Image: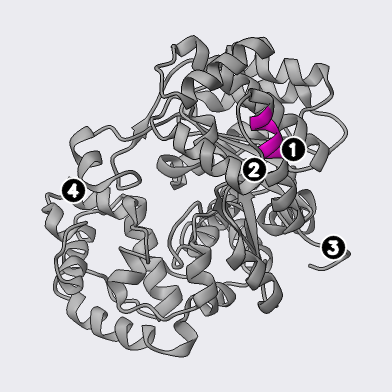
Amino acid sequence: MFLNDDFLLTTDTAKKLFHNYAEKMPIIDYHCHLNPVEIYENKNFANLTEAWLVSGTYGDHYKWRLERANGIPEHYITGDADPYEKFMAWAKTIERSVGNPLYEWTHIELRRFFGITTLLNTKTAPEIWRKCNEMLAQPEFKRRELIKRFNVRVVCTTDDPIDDLRYQIALQKEEKAFKVLPAFRPDKILNIQKKTYSDYVAKLAEVAETPIKTFADVMTALQKRIDFFDEHGSKLADHALDTVSYEDATATELDKIVAKAVANEVLSDHEIAQYQTALIKGLMRIYHEKDWTMQFHIHAFRDLNAGMFEKIGPDTGYDGMNDRPIMDSLASLFESMEKEDAVPRTILYSLNSKDWLPLITMMNCYQKDVRQKLQLGAGWWFNDTRTKMREQLDTFADESCLPNFVGMLTDSRSFLSYPRHEYFRRVLCEWLGEMVQRGQVPDDEEMLGKIVEDISYNNAHDWFHFFDGDFK
């Protein structure tokens, strides 16, 4: 039966593990793109389109890509069509998307948030629209209440170094049910090749109260901002690396590169790699000192449709997957930092699953002191599917200690995305149940239940150090 209580749970062991262990565990969403302003203001959504397709200042580009594949005109996706028309365009798409994860996610979200078990299609959409909008107007459907409903204990937002974190700071004072913590994402200072770099350096210098003329000045400013983030609960940094190129440089060379970029002069690929290598190494030293976790999101191929990028900007569904070689450069990076004993806690995600085995085998060469100090990140973006979740679990288990895995994250801009944690937990329990059935692991419910609880929540709780004392 479609999406019944036991969907994906194909063995008795899987059913026991999910219902007795996974289902009850809280959520730590250690990487997402929720807007802290929206969390703080805690408003109701105007309608289901705002909640599902266009959340505040963001849109759900997963859905937008699928609509385009179904031939929906852009007017009904990112254009100025009426919210109801946009919702009907999504209903028209979802009835053609059987087999796509969004088909399951859409119906899980209807069930978990709204109690609606009716299939969404063009015939049922008007009544679903009416029912959901009635509920969305109620106090229990405000943004913070949706977070609380899923027993979320931590939300880590994704924040630029120049952000003042005013909303996270206010939430930390006001909200007692869950923590909202910033995560440091220095992409704009890393991407020296972009035309916006010079203007961004000026903004960073102003916020950090540090004139920036040399590479050392850049690092001084970033150190100050990391200290500020750390004071307000940050334990993580994240970097979007479309690819990785390792090139050493002298201090003089780095100063010249910064000066050229600030003057809006064109840099060579070699100079870009030199600067990015030095910047990442400098940041790794700071992260290690702070006992932060460093995340690399690797191999997105961004903004492929130049015409649409010019019209509607980034993060609108026009990104793909890259396949450039990265392992030589990553290995050089970690080898260099290991010589300084400055490798921080690390999670490496690659959008291209061909990288997973090379990544985890490389990381295992630098494990020490901390349990699973370096981790293979959860299936991400295009890999956020049952097939790829299972492949990631296979790779992690084959080459390292899967029971140490810090588990799932939403990586989402949507307040309705928390059922993705349920989906992952079902896949995990399905995967473990099949191993029991094949005789690969003992049929020991207590032992396996502990593993499920740890991957679902406990490992993230303990590994990131989000909490003081014994708070669970």
Which residue position is annotated with label 2?
237
Which element is circle 2 on?
strand
- Cα–Cα gap, marks 3 and 2: 20 Å
Which element is circle 3 on?
loop
Query: Going by the image, does 112 lie left or right of 73?
Result: right
Neighbourhood count class around disc 2 (C-alpha, 10 Å): few under 14, some 14–19, many 20 upward: many
Amino acid type, callout 3:
Asp
Q: Earlier in the sequence, mark 4 or mark 3?
A: 4
- Cα–Cα gap, marks 1 and 3: 19 Å
Picture disc at residue 68: 4
Answer whether labels 1 and 2 touch (C-beta < 8 Å).
yes
- Cα–Cα gap, marks 4 and 1: 41 Å
Query: Going by the image, does 70 lie left or right of 101?
Result: left
Q: Earlier in the sequence, mark 2 or mark 4?
A: 4
Select label 3 or label 2 by which is in front. Answer: 2
Amino acid type, callout 1:
Tyr
* Residue drawn at point x = 74 percent, y = 37 percent: 287
Answer whether labels 3 and 2 touch (C-beta < 8 Å).
no
Instruction: Give the magenta part as a residue range.
Output: 217-223
Which residue position is annotated with label 1?
287
Neighbourhood count class around disc 3 (C-alpha, 10 Å): few under 14, some 14–19, many 20 upward: few
Q: Earlier in the sequence, mark 3 or mark 2?
A: 2
Q: Nearer the viewer, residue 227 or 143?
A: 227
